[in-house]
Amino acid sequence: MSRGETMAAALSRALKLPGKKGSELGEYDPLTQADSDDESEEDDLVLNYPRNGLGRDGCLAPGSSKLRNGRLGRLVGATDGARDEEEEEEEDDDQWTDQVSGKPRRSRDDLKGGQYWSRRELGTGEDRGGGAGPSGAAGLGSHSSEAEEKRKRAKNAIRSAFFLVPLACAMLIVLLCAFLVPCQKAELEKKLRWERALGDAGGVTPPALALWDVDGDSVEDVLLGVTEWTNGTHATQRSKVYSAVAVCAASGQLLWREVLNEPVMYLQCGLQLSTQPSPVCLIIGKSNLMAVNGSTGRKLWSVALRNIESQAVLLPDIQGDSVPDLLLATLPADETLDLSLTLISGQTGKKIGNPVPFNLKGQGKLIGPLLHETQQGAYYILFGLGNVQAISLQDIYVRALDKMPETRFVLRKDMSWENMKNATSSSFISIYSGSERVEFLLPLVAGFGNNRNSLDAVSNLNSTRSDWVLFYGASTLSVLRQRDLHKQWTFSNASIHSEPALGHFNGDGVLDLFVQHSANGIMTALILSGASGTPLWKAEFVCPRLVLEASAVSTSTGQSVFLFWGSEPIRAQRNAPRTTMAPGVAAAEPLIRKLFLLHPAHPAALLQLSSTTDTAVTSAVSYLEYLKDATYITVSSRPTTGSESSAQIVESTSLRAAIKTGQIVQLGETQKTEAAGKVAAHEVNAFFRRLSFKPQ
C-alpha cells in the first residue's frame, strides 16, 4: 500500500462513528446503530463521565503526553470513565467490607487484577514536578495502603475492646455471684444461729413474745418480756425487776430495754403513726398500756387501765386522724363486775369515750376479742366467756360516746348479721353458745398461729375476713362459716391441749389443721383436712403433755412444713402389743426433747432438726424473704446449777441451716402413711436440702 493510502485509512478509522460491530467485519456500523444509540450515548456521556478525568490506562492524568482527539477519544474516555466510576463504587464497597472483615485492601486489589489503580492510590502517587513513573506511583501507593491498613487494625482493636471488656466484666460479675453470694448466705446463716440468756424463766409460763424488724436490717427482731432478780445479801432483800427488751435477730445483741413496774403480758408491733417514721410497739401490762418507738424503745404515750385481760385489737380509723385505733378487754377478778371493752386512740393513747360494760352470763376463759369484717364491709367484735358473741363496732362506739358516729362508712351494720340476733337480746349475735365451754377461737388464716402479735394492717385485714376454727368441750373441733355461722364440719377426739397450726398438707388449696393431744404419757400428732375434717396423717410420740403450739411454714413446693416438739416416735410393729405409760412414770417425761419437721411429700419420714434437755415454752417463726429462708425462735426454760430457779433462754435457728445438719427419722411400718412407701434416707435429705421458704 502506498504512503497516501495508509494515511487515508488511518484518518478514516479516526473519523469513523461508533456503532454495532458487524458479525463478520468486527467493526462498528454507524448506519444500523445510529438511531438506537443516540439516547444511550448521550446518557453515557452524562452519567459515566469520569469524575477524576482518568482513562483506563491513566493517560489523561496530569503530566501525561497522550491525548485523545475526536469523537472516538471522547467515547473511549467516557467508557473508561464509566468503568472507573464502577470501579470506585466497587472499591468503596470493598473498603467498607474490608473494614468489617479486617482483610487488607491491597490483597483484594491484587485479586481484581492489579493493573487497575484506585483514585486514592493514583492521587497519592501524583508527581507535582511534571510526571509520575510507574515505579513512583507504585511505591507511594504501597505506603498509603500500609497506613490505611494500620488505621483499620486500630479500629478493629478498638471494636474488639468495646466488645471484650463488657463481656469480661459480665463474666466477672457472674463468677462473683456464683462464689461470693453463697458464701455470704452461709455466713448470714451462721449469724442467725445464736443463743442468749435473758432473765428468769419463772416456771413454764410462756413469756410475752413478738417479732418485728425494729433496726431496719430486713430481719425480724425479737421482742420479749423479761423478769430478773436484783442482787441482795439475803434472799429477803431480793426483788423482781420487769422489763421489755428488743434483741437483734441477726446477731443476738440487745437493742434496747424498757423497765416497767409490772410483768409484761403482751407485746405487739407494727402500729404506724403519722408522727413516727419508725414502727410503734405496744407493751401491755395488767394495768397499763404503753406505746414505744420500736427502734429506740423511747416511750411515746401510755394509758392507765385496770385489769387488762387481752391483747390490743387493731381497729379501722374511727376518729378520722388517719391512724388506726385500738380496743382492749378488761375483766376484773371479782365475778360480780362485768367484762368491758375500751376504745383507745392509736395516735395519742387517750380513751375514746367510756369503757363499755357487758353482762355476760357464760363462765370460762376469755375468748377474743377479735375483729371481723363481713362481706358487706361492716365491722363486728367477737368475744365471750366460755361462749362467743358478736356486736357491731358501731354499737360499741355509740355506747362509748353516747352519740352516732360521723364516719358512717366505717361504722355501719350488716343487716344479714343483724337478723341473726338472739330473740332475747337486742345487742348480741350468738356465734356459739352451748353446754361445753369454748377453749379457742381463731381465724382460719395461714400463719396466724406463728406470730399473731402483729399490728400490721394488711395481715390483720386478711384475718378479719375468714372463717373460724372453734374448739369447745376440750375435745371437739369445728370450722364455722362466717357468712351464715353454720358449722362446716365437726371432729371429736381426745383432749386437745393447744391451738392448731394452719398449713397446706394436701393439694386441695384449703388450709389443714395440725393438732396435738396427750394421754397416758403419749403425745399424738394429727393433721385434719380443712375441707372435710378427716384425718390425713397421724403419729405418736413418747412425750408428756407439752403446752407448746406447733408452727406451719410455707415452702417453695406450694405445701407447708410443720414444726413441732416431741420425743422418740412410737414405732408400732406388726403383731406387737401396744404399750402405754402411766403419767407418773419417769419415762413419760423424757429429758431429751426434739424438734421435728414434717413435709407432706414424705409423710413416712421426719427430719429431726435439733434436740435439747431444755423445756420449750413458746416459739415463733420469722421469714427472710431475700434469702428464701425462715428462722425458728424458741424461748426455753433451762435449770441453773445450784439454784431452784431456771434461766430463760432465747434461741434462733435458720431452718435451712438446721436442715443441712438434720437427721432422718423413719416412722413405724404400720403407720397410716405406709401407702406413701419408705424412701431412702439420702433421697429424703436431698429433697429437704432443696427446700426454700416463703411468707404465708
Image (spheres, rainbow, N blue to C red):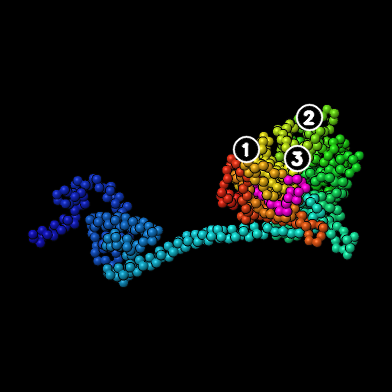
Instruction: Identify the amino acid type marked 1.
Output: Asp
Q: Is residue 499 visible?
A: no
At 67% from the left and 43% from the top, the residue drawn is 539
Instruction: Residue 495: give its label.
Output: 3
Instruction: Residue 174: give its label.
Output: none
Provide the residue designation for mark 2.
Answer: 420
Q: Which residues are magenta?
A: 581-599
- Secondary structure, mark 1, is loop
- Secondary structure, mark 3, is loop
Q: Is residue 169 left or right of residue 116?
A: right
At 63% from the left and 46% from the top, the residue drawn is 667
Residue 463 percent coordinates (x, y): 72, 41
Provide the residue designation for mark 1.
Answer: 508
Dot 1, crowdedness within 10 Å: few (<14), some or many (≥20)?
Answer: few
Q: Nearer the viewer, residue 377 or 509?
A: 509
Which quadrant would the C terminus be assigned to in this image? Answer: top right
Q: Is residue 151 left or right of residue 319?
A: left
Residue 364 lies in the magenta-colored region: no
Residue 561 percent coordinates (x, y): 64, 46
Q: CA distance from mark 2 to mark 1?
A: 32 Å
Which is in the foreground here, disc 2 or disc 3? 3
